[in-house]
């Protein structure tokens, strides 16, 4: 829901006018996952009286104000895991059983206690510790105990910090840009960078940091995605052009307009910028459409390994330039 484009919403509104006529007196079940704006609901669902009695509309959201704006009939808040449930979840991912082995009971209980009520943390930490010796469990517990309960990202970062360079690159690629992409397409880029993506992805999935659906699409939990993006922000808070990944469109617009330093950029995403940037001075498109060069006026992009362009107009520069 949070990736819906303004143009797409307008099209949906037009379509709903047609659907309203067809949906009248129709019993439906509609599920909207991770809704963050009431306007998205209005465009996707329309009005309640369009549907006949017995219809159900289910909405999940992290923003209770959305539910208030929708004036929902009933609201359900999932209960957090207690210590017993937390230990069980940790054990499932660490030992593939609902309870830890006898020699790991004590340390497992302490670890579950530090992350009680945090399912994702328990899943990621448990997956990371699977088949690890007890000394690794003890070291992980010491790290967790130093992190305040409300700093979930820091708890999740314990697993990230143990990744290889190639695994970190793939994790950050997915977090910053490639969530929702078909794995095959992303693998072309990774293999070209000698990341051996099949093995790295397999390891990331084992650690519960990445998931691949039955449709072969790359998926990542929002909290893990937030962790990846925060790691990139920390590379340079004041200068987006000095970061490895540049996906935020406002930041990309600023970097390209102001011709800032771009030598560190490895992954660049341009989306809906055709009216904002002078593309006649930015991009040169080869005769066959498969050769893309970056005009030196926006800085050096020697380390660029991926350029993602969508809904953007590209014009060929005159040969004299």
Image: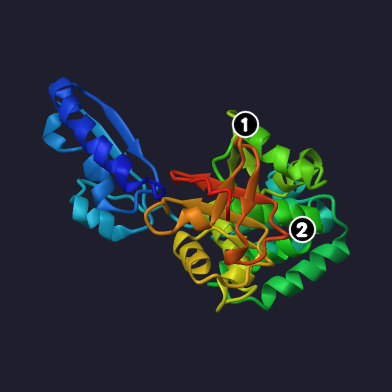
Q: Residue at x 38, y 56 (%)?
A: 62
- Colour convention: rainbow
Please report whichever mark, 1 or 2, sits nearer to the chain's N-terminal start. Answer: 2
Q: Is residue 85 visible?
A: no
Q: Is residue 4 visible?
A: yes
In the rendered image, residue 76, in percent from the top left (x then y), is placed at 33, 50
**Element at label 1:** loop
**Front tag of 1 and 2:** 1
In the rendered image, residue 265, in percent from the top left (x then y), is placed at 65, 63
Q: In the figure, 247 relative to 46: above or below?
A: below
In the rendered image, residue 16, in percent from the top left (x then y), is placed at 20, 32
In the rendered image, residue 184, in percent from the top left (x then y), is placed at 67, 33
- Of 36 and 280, nearer the camera is 280
- Of 310 and 213, nearer the camera is 310
Disc number at residue 216? Answer: 1
- Which quarter of the figure has residue 43? top left
Q: In the figure, 235 relative to 80: above or below?
A: below
Q: Which residue is mark 2?
A: 105
Left/right of residue 11 with respect to residue 242 in the rendered view: left
**Element at label 2:** helix
- Of 106 and 51, nearer the camera is 51
Q: Quadrant of the C terminus?
A: bottom right
Inter-mark Cα distance, 1 to 2: 37 Å
Query: Around disc 1, counting alpha carbons within 10 Å, would you say few (fewer than 14), some (14 to 19), or many (20 or more)?
Result: few
């Amino acid at each position: 829901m949070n990736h819906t484009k303004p143009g797409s919403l307008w099209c949906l509104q037009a379509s709903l006018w047609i659907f309203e006529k067809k949906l009248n007196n129709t019993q439906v079940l509609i599920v909207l996952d991770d809704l963050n704006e009431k306007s998205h609901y209005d465009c996707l669902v329309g009005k309640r009286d369009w549907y006949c009695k017995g219809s159900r509309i289910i909405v999940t959201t992290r923003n209770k104000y959305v539910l208030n704006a929708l004036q929902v009939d009933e609201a359900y808040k999932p209960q957090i895991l207690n210590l017993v449930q937390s230990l069980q979840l940790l054990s499932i991912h660490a030992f593939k059983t609902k309870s830890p082995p006898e020699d790991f009971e004590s340390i497992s209980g302490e670890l579950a206690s530090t992350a009680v009520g945090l399912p994702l943390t328990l899943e990621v930490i448990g997956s990371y510790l699977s088949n690890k010796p007890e000394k690794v469990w003890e070291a992980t517990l010491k790290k967790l105990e130093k992190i305040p309960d409300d700093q979930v990202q820091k708890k999740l970062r314990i697993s990230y910090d143990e990744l290889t360079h190639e695994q970190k690159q793939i994790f950050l690629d997915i977090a910053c840009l490639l969530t929702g992409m078909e794995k095959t397409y992303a693998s072309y880029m990774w293999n070209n960078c000698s990341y051996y993506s099949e093995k790295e992805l397999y390891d990331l999935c084992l650690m519960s940091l990445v998931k691949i659906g039955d449709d072969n699409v790359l998926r990542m939990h929002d909290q893990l995605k937030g962790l990846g993006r925060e790691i990139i922000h920390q590379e340079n808070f004041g200068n987006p052009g000095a970061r490895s990944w540049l996906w935020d469109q406002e930041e990309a617009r600023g970097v390209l307009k102001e011709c800032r330093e771009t030598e560190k950029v490895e992954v660049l995403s341009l989306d809906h910028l055709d009216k904002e940037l002078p593309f006649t001075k930015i991009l040169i498109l080869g005769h066959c459409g498969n050769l893309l060069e970056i005009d030196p006026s926006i800085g050096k992009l020697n380390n660029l390994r991926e350029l993602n362009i969508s809904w953007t107009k590209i014009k060929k520069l005159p040969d004299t330039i």
